[in-house]
Image (cartoon, rainbow, N blue to C red):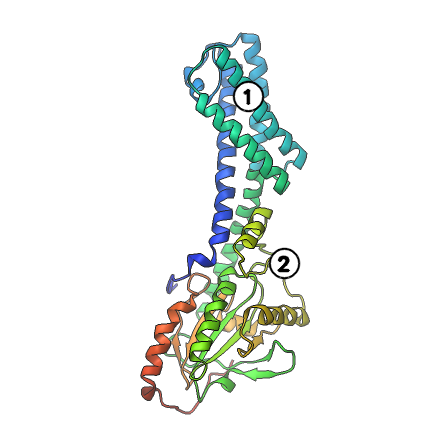
Amino acid sequence: MEQYEQIMSIDSVLPFVLAFSAHGVLAGIQLGLGLAIFFSSAINLLQKESATWLSHLGFTNNLSNEYKRIVGTLQLVLAALLCLPLVIDLPFFVSLLMFIAVGAVYITYHRQAVSRSQATGTLSRYAVIAFALVATTFTSYEHNSPLQSMRYIAQDVMKYRPLEQNWQNEFDINAPKIGQQAVEFSLLQSDGKTISQLSDFLGEKPVVLFLGANSCPVFSAGLADINRLHEKYKDSINFVGVYVSEPHATDEWPLARTQLVETSKIFFNHPVATDIAQHTNFPDRLRVAERLKRNLLHQNIPLLVDGMDDAVNNRWVGRPARLYFISADGHIIYNPGKGPYSFNPLHLEPILDKYLANKEQHKKKPLALLEP
């Protein structure tokens, strides 16, 4: 399958990359700490001799056999609680008490280590106590532990990303390619009153056609560049958008699965919508399309709304974001590929300049679009 160009701007997804990375780091520390405590527990419960290497992880050595069994049992419980969110959900209050207990245990370890003049492991103990404080704050904020929150995110990606890729690969075979004739379509505009065909915007001028939905961060962020290009080329080029189904609907593949992601989106003032459920009827789709048009798109750029049969989306492979440049006579000039990785309006600007510089070579020919 053709891969096309990988030109997506990292700025369009930066808030989410940072939030997901923070989730991943905290989840990794939680899991690693749980495994370390588990091995320490096994040694305390099964081995009479103390392990010197444990001191480097912040654990005390030279415990009495009776105390080792008590500590080992406590460690086993903590290790299980730290690692269990990898496979099952833990109640919020259990996760919260777990991190408080981890902090308390390591503070106790540290005091014992100081009393025994154990110099090794001090940094490790301080690091775990600091993590316990951060994880307690995180859990209070998210009502989930870092590992449990990250598992939700990973499950979404593993479930929905392959479905998206399979759909794109299946339908992209028939999507218009460079040099081919564009496919005609007729859709209602977001005002709910005007029906327009693609051919209405061709003939006299070429068309920049963009497809997507407000729940795609790459598409939503890219509309600012679409507006800028429109201002620059509005006398020579028509810009037309098509609103399609939501790639990150709240009930399918929610982008803001956690509060941290939503906070990051707000902090960076990202225009993506994280509150839209998948459209179940055309009035719903029309409503969210009009909201996007009102908030993010230049008022003079028409936004058409795909029908509930998703016919235009399927033929042009518009989900989650897609960009085309079509000559005045209806031929595809630019098609960087499947979104979101191939969606970046900034890469279109030199192509528009080149087309207009050579417009004598693109004299109007009879317009004959392919039937849908």
Residue 187 visible from this viewpoint: yes
* Numbered disc 2: secondary structure: loop
The reply to whether the C-beta atoms of the residues labelled 2 and 1 are less than 8 Å apart is no
> Counting other residues with Cα less than 10 Å from the Cα at mark 1, is it few (<14), some (14-19), or many (20 or more)?
some
Q: Is residue 215 above or below residue 352?
A: above
Residue 46 visible from this viewpoint: no
* Numbered disc 1: secondary structure: helix
Residue drawn at (35%, 78%) of the image: 353
Residue that carries the numbered disc 1 in the rendered image:
107
2 vs 1, front mark: 1
Location of residue 197 (image quadrant): bottom right
List x then y, in percent, for residue 349: 38, 73
Q: Nearer the viewer, residue 271 or 95?
A: 271
Residue drawn at (46%, 81%) of the image: 234
Q: Nearer the viewer, residue 208 or 75?
A: 208
List x then y, in percent, for residue 368: 45, 88
Q: Is residue 128 above or below residue 139?
A: above
Distance between mark 2 and mark 1 Cα atoms: 42 Å
Residue drawn at (31%, 87%) of the image: 361
How many numbered marks are there? 2
Location of residue 105 (image quadrant): top right
Q: Which mark is residue 295?
A: none
Quarter of the image where the N terminus is located = bottom left
Residue that carries the numbered disc 2 in the rendered image:
275
Amino acid type, residue under disc 1 in the picture: Ile
